[in-house]
Each structure stands twice: as C-alpha cells, then as structure tokens.
C-alpha cells in the first residue's frame, strides 16, 4: 500500500489523567523510558513501589535524547533504532524557547481515508508495519482467512489488534496460538514519548492519562507542567516508600497531591519518580 509522509511538529497542550485501580497504572510509561521497577523487600509479586530511571535528565537544552543516546541538532535517529513504527525521519531540532526536540514525519496510511468497499480487509505482513501492505476483498475471500480468537473477539489473518487491558499490539497470522507474550505474535505498544514530549521531560512535567485506559490509550494524552497556579498539598501520609517524586524543581512524597486549574484533573505522587495526573470525563468540581 502507498503511504503519504508529511513532516509535522507535535505541539502538546496542558491536559491531565491516569487510572488508579490496583497498581498504579503508569508502569508502561516508565518501561518505555528504560526505567526498572523497584519491588518491596521480600515480595516480588507485589506492585512496584517505585521505578529507577536511567541517569538521563534531558537537562541539556541543546541536545535531544533517545534510548540513552544524545543527538546534536540536525542529527537524525537511524530508522532501525526507532521503536515507534509510525515515526519516521526523526531529526533533532532547536525549537524556540523549548530547546532541542525531535521533529518526525507523520505517516498517513491510505486505509484511513480509502473509499474502498467495507468488505475489503486491509492486511499487515509484520508487527513493525505502520500501514497495511495489502488487502483481501470479497466476503468469501475474507471468510476463508484464519481466525484469531481473543477476549471473546475474532480477528482475521493479517489484521492488527490490541488485546484488552494489555499494552500490546498483535498480528493475526497462521502462527497465532493465543499467546500474547510471544514476540512472534505481539509487541509492546510504543508511545514515542521521547520523540514527541522531550521538552516536557526536560521540565520534569507530569504525564497525563485518560480515566479509562487499555491498549494504546495507556499512552499519555499530554503533560502537566509546573506553573504559578499549581498548588502542592503535602498530606504527610505514613508510607514505607522512601522514594520521592520530582515535579519541576519540587520534590514530593508518596501520597502528596498537586492541584491544577484544569477541570476534572487530579495529580498525585503515587509511583515515583514522577507525579502523574488523571483526567476524568465528568466531575462535580
């Protein structure tokens, strides 16, 4: 299939969110940044109490960073090193007051605006495909394809899909056996956080997530950065976790909250080293 590539600069507004059921559900955010979980002593099966992240502070405003490598302005990340399939030609650029950031080409897949009849199924050859590479048309031809069953749903051979409540994307193939932890069938979803939010990371801003998360929606919908209208509430909760959260130049203990002006947004230090925010669809205040 043909693809159309256009260069865009992603500009992120101020928004906030995340889910707080059971374990703090921001582990995938940390794992993408190369952080490792810190478990409570004596019980490796419990939720992590914090994460330890690589000593990359993104503090040099004249450089971009990706997967532990520093890039000078004008330097491009080798395409083979980019883990987000739809991010292409990512070049480090100096952008006004925010300093160095990556500018990537955006890939517009033909199937997203194709006028072909709905009985055509767009198919993918590889988990690393951003856009479809072929199509199968006609009800009989589609019906003859292998089925992949998961989560009480059925997918056809060549389809990409996201299992429920797992930060994974899978490809239905002749080798599908229902094992979503198989590298042959599924891969972790990569949100391109370092590619698209580098200035926010540099400022120690808080990732914002939506209230109801699954699959790719576990990616941040934005970042909340420190400003004069934000209030930090220190609750002095008793906790065995000594690790702290960093927000801008401020340090918070687990349980501390951050009040922002954004409606329906709550932020807290729940899983160091970053505070995180959750944006709900509706709220009383």
Image (cartoon, rainbow, N blue to C red):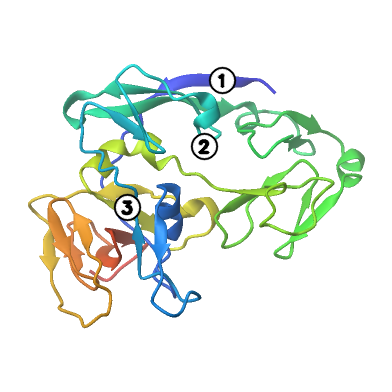
**SS at mark 2?**
loop
Q: Quadrant of residue 284?
A: bottom left
CA distance for labels 2 and 3: 18 Å
Examine the rendering and report whether any part of residue 26 can be seen: no
Q: Residue furthest bottom?
A: 238
Q: In the depicted view, which residue is nearer to us: 220 or 252?
A: 252
**SS at mark 1?**
strand
Locate residue 32 relative to residue 255 in the image: left or right: right
Q: Residue at x 13, y 72 (%)?
A: 234
Mark 1, Cα crowd under 10 Å, few <14 / some 14-19 / many 20+, is few
Q: Residue at x 11, y 62 (%)?
A: 231
Which image quadrant: the C terminus? Answer: bottom left
Q: Give me the disc on residue 207.
A: 3
Asked whether the residues under the numbered discs 3 and 1 touch, taking CB atoms below 8 Å apart as contact, a structural biologist would say no
Mark 3, Cα crowd under 10 Å, few <14 / some 14-19 / many 20+, is many
Q: Earlier in the sequence, mark 1 or mark 2?
A: 1
Frontmost of labels 3 and 1 is: 3
Q: Give me the disc on residue 84.
A: 2
Where residue 200 appears, x then y in whole percent? 26, 42
Q: Earlier in the sequence, mark 3 or mark 1?
A: 1
Determine which residue is flagged by label 1: 4
Q: Give me the disc on residue 83.
A: none
Mark 2, Cα crowd under 10 Å, few <14 / some 14-19 / many 20+, is some
Q: Is residue 111 above or below residue 221?
A: above
Which image quadrant: the N terminus? Answer: top right
CA distance for labels 3 and 1: 30 Å
Q: In the depicted view, which residue is nearer to us: 177 or 96?
A: 177
Q: Is residue 4 above or below residue 129?
A: above
Locate residue 191 relative to residue 125 in the image: left or right: left
Q: Residue at x 20, y 57 (%)?
A: 246
Image mark count: 3
């Amino acid at each position: 299939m043909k693809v159309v590539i256009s260069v865009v600069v992603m500009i992120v507004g101020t928004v906030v969110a995340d889910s707080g059921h059971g374990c703090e559900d921001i582990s995938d955010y940390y794992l993408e940044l190369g952080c490792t979980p810190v478990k409570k002593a004596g019980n490796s099966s419990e939720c992590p109490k914090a994460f330890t992240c690589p000593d990359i502070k993104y503090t040099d405003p004249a450089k971009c960073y990706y997967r532990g490598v520093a890039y000078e302005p004008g330097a491009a990340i080798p395409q083979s090193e980019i883990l987000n399939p739809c991010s292409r030609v990512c070049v480090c650029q100096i952008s006004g007051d925010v300093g160095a950031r990556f500018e990537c080409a955006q890939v517009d897949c033909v199937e997203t605006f194709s006028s072909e009849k709905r009985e055509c199924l767009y198919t993918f050859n590889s988990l690393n495909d951003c856009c479809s590479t072929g199509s199968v048309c006609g009800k009989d031809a589609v019906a003859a394809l292998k089925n992949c069953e998961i989560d009480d749903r059925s997918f056809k051979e060549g389809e990409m899909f996201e299992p429920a409540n797992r930060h994974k994307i899978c490809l239905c193939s002749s080798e599908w056996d229902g094992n979503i932890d198989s590298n042959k069938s599924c891969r972790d979803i990569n949100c391109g956080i370092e590619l698209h939010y580098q200035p926010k990371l540099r400022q120690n801003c808080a990732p914002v997530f939506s209230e109801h998360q699954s699959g790719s929606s576990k990616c941040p919908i934005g970042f909340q950065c420190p400003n004069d209208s934000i209030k930090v509430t220190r609750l002095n909760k008793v906790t065995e976790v000594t690790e702290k959260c960093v927000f801008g130049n401020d340090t918070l203990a687990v349980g501390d909250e951050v009040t922002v002006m954004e409606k329906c947004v709550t932020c807290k230090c729940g899983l160091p080293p970053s505070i995180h925010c959750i944006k709900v669809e509706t709220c009383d205040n």
